[in-house]
Amino acid sequence: MAKYNGFKLEDVIEEADKKNKANGGFEKRLFLEKVITGDKD
């Protein structure tokens, strides 16, 4: 997909690493499964 869009794989990985450092990642592999609210609708 990266090559198709004109990017090198190394550039995509580098940008992903920057984003992970800035925003955090999923080291603990925790995912939101559902949200419970007080609304009945």
Image (spheres, rainbow, N blue to C red):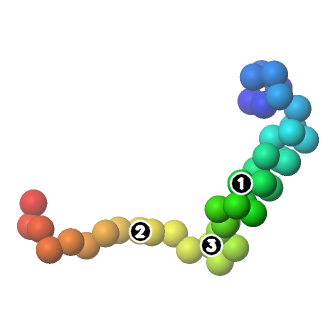
Q: x and y percent of residue 13 in the render?
A: 83, 47
Point 88% across, 32% down: residue: 8
Mark found first going from the N terminus, 1 or 3: 1
Above or below, 39 relative to 10:
below
Numbered circles on residues, count: 3
Q: Disc 2 designates what residue? A: 33
Q: Residue furthest front?
A: 22
Q: Looking at the picture, which amino acid does disc 2 mark?
A: Glu
Residue ID for mark 3: 29
Q: Residue at x 74, y 30 (%)?
A: 1
**Front label number (2 vs 1):** 1
Identify the image quadrant of residue 25. Answer: bottom right
Task: Report the amino acid beneath label 1.
Answer: Lys
Q: Position of residue 9 (x, y in %)?
A: 87, 37
User: In the image, what residue occupies the spot 41% across and 68% down?
Assistant: 33
Q: CA distance from mark 2 to mark 1?
A: 24 Å
**Residue 3 image-quadrant placement:** top right
Looking at the picture, which amino acid does disc 3 mark? Answer: Arg
18 sits to left or right of 34: right
Q: Which residue is mark 1?
A: 19
Mark 2 to mark 3 CA distance (whole Å):
12 Å
The disc, 2 or 1, on the residue closer to the chain's N-terminal end is 1
